[in-house]
Amino acid sequence: MGKTLFVIGVLIALIGATMMAGVPLGRLPGDLTVRRGAFTFYFPLATSILVSVVLTVVLYLLRR
């Protein structure tokens, strides 16, 4: 339990540090935005892939 809480804390700190450094999470190149008149559709494709890769690595390290 302690190891899991430590890893979660480190991940939260890393996410905070990257956002403070100016990395626009949620507005990465590869995120799709379609604007047509008053309609806007936003699909965070690159952000979803990045989150998936990070979670895969974290879960792999936790199961190890």
Image: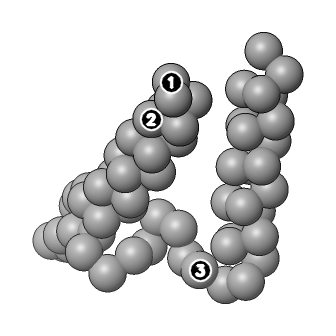
Mark 3 secondary-structure assignment = loop
Q: Amino acid at mark 1?
A: Arg
Between 56 and 41, the one nearer to me in the picture: 56
Q: Does residue 55 sit above or below 45 in this rendering?
A: above
Quarter occupied by residue 47: bottom left
Report crowding for label 1: few under 14, some 14 to 19, many 20 or more residues within 10 A (C-alpha). Answer: few
Which mark is on residue 63?
1
44 vs 51, nearest the viewer: 51
Residue 24 position, x and y percent, is: 55, 76
Q: In this rendered view, identify the residue nearer to me: 8 or 40.
A: 8
Mark found first going from the N terminus, 2 or 3 = 3
Is residue 6 visible from the viewing direction of this image? Answer: yes
Q: Is residue 7 above or below residue 44?
A: above
Give the label on residue 60, or none.
2
Identify the colour scheme used: one colour
Q: Secondary structure at mark 2?
A: helix
Give above or below for 12 relative to 15: above
Residue type marked 3 = Val
